[in-house]
Image (tube, grey):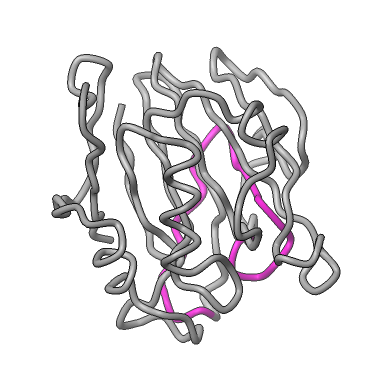
Amino acid sequence: MTLSWFGHSCFRLEGKDISLLIDPFSKEIGLKPPRIKDQIVLVTHDHYDHANIEGAESETMIIKNPGEYEVKGVYINGISSFHDNSNGTQRGLNTIYCIKFDDITFCHLGDLGQEVLDEKQTDLIGNVDVLMVPVGGKYTIGSKEAVKVVGQIEPKIIIPMHYKTPELNIDIESADKFLKEVGLVPEKVDKLKVTQKTLPQEEMKLVLLNY
């Protein structure tokens, strides 16, 4: 199982026979969008920096809403959440996706804006191996809230996302504050290759992906 990052909140999960793309963005954000070659595309919410499905094949399974899905042995649970800390009154709804893929459970929080998850959400999320968490603030949770949410979920691997990078033209913070708050030494890699055997067994691991 290989996890690649294209910047912002866009990731590709690749198994032996199937790949899945999360939150493909428009080129308007300053980054180069990935070509959609995947059998499954997940969209956490309908904003231009998360929902560019242009170029997807007609047979591509595009998932945009909460619910339970099963596609070619990949199990997906979309969980409703808020894009702000005011019950969605400012920026609307956001879908958290939990993805069971090759015996690894991934969780992508999308543009989560809630300072903390509620009990129902944490129950639905359950045990997570790899967590993708927004940390850039302004439109999502920031560094302090992200650390709280990580503590609620307790994943084995943490991957920060939705933070300022050199080419990104969206006004959000860098990952620096989160890295200080979380207190773990990051491992920097181009791609994350993970199996059940290579998952950390005791302490959380912090991974920074290049794009």
Q: Quadrant of the N terminus?
A: top left
Majority secondary structure in the magenta region = loop
For residue 15, above or below residue 142 = above
Q: Nearer the viewer, residue 147 or 23?
A: 147
Q: Is residue 49 magenta?
A: yes
Q: Is residue 37 above or below residue 123?
A: below
Task: Name the residue rendered at 31%, 73% in the picture.
Answer: 177
In the rendered image, residue 90, in percent from the top left (x then y), is placed at: 80, 74
Image coordinates of residue 74 in percent, x first then y, are 54, 19
Residue at (50, 49) in percent of width and height:
149
Residue 39 vs residue 143, the one in the foreground: 143
Q: Describe residue 166's horizontal placement relative to residue 83 as left or right.
A: left
Give the residue displayed 58% in from the left and 67% down from the top.
Answer: 140
Q: Name the residue at the right extreme.
A: 89
Magenta part of the protein: which range?
A: 29-51
Side of 28 where 32 appears, left or right? left
Q: Left or right of 149: which side holds 12?
A: left
Vertical arrangement, residue 62 with respect to residue 142, above or below = above
- Picture coordinates of residue 178, whole percent (x, y): 33, 66
Q: What residue do we see at 69% from left, 67% from top?
A: 47
Q: Quadrant of the C terminus?
A: bottom left
- Would you place residue 23 above or below residue 7 in this image? above
Instruction: Determine which quarter of the picture holds residue 83.
Output: bottom right
Name the foreground residue: 164 vs 121: 121
Residue 179, image quadrant: bottom left
Instruction: From the top left corner, tell me how far across and down residue 76 is, in percent.
Output: 62, 26
